Amino acid sequence: SAPEPARSPAPDRAAKEILQQRMQAAGLGTPRYVVTAESGPDHLKHFTVEVRLDAPGHGDVVLGQAAAGNKKEAQQAAARIACLQLEEYLSSTEGRTGA
């Protein structure tokens, strides 16, 4: 029998919501989703999306990037990556001052 797919910490449909909740809880505002690339013919577009946060003292920080066949899927995939990267970002900035 085929192995079960790996379970992500956030279901696909909830990744954006979970990321937003985590960012707001950390006082980081809301994530921004930016389409950085589109490729392919109109009937077969491929989108690359970045999740960014405006970090005081750090400028524009990219937390995740993903590509998919539509913007919504690319946003969800980028949000899943960003959920993981957010923990790393928070750990790396913990205890730092804005100076």
Image: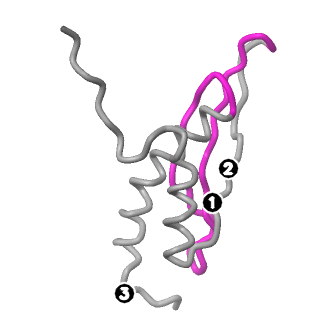
Q: First in sequence, mark 3 or 2: give its number.
A: 2
- Which mark identifies residue 95? 3
Mark 3–mark 2 Cα distance, whole angstroms, equals 28 Å
Say which quadrant the N terminus sits in.
Answer: top left
Mark 1–mark 2 Cα distance, whole angstroms, equals 7 Å
Q: Is residue 39 left or right of residue 29?
A: right
Amino acid type indicated by mark 3: Gly
Q: Which residue lies furthest to the right in this view?
A: 42
Count of number-bearing discs: 3
Task: Name the dominant secondary structure of the magenta segment.
Answer: strand
Whether residue 54 is situated above or below residue 68 in the rendered picture? below
Looking at the rendered structure, the secondary structure element under dot 2 is: strand
Percent across and percent down for residue 71 are 69, 33
Whether residue 89 is situated above or below residue 1 in the rendered picture? below
Q: Is residue 67 left or right of residue 82?
A: right
Would you say residue 44 sits in the magenta stretch? Answer: yes
Residue carrying label 2: 33
Percent across and percent down for residue 50 are 61, 46
Q: Give the range drawn in magenta.
A: 42-71
Amino acid type indicated by mark 2: Tyr
Asked if disc 1 and disc 2 are in contact, CB closer than 8 Å, the reply is yes
Q: State the residue at coordinates (78%, 10%).
A: 43
Q: State the residue at coordinates (31%, 36%).
A: 7
Q: First in sequence, mark 1 or 3: give its number.
A: 1
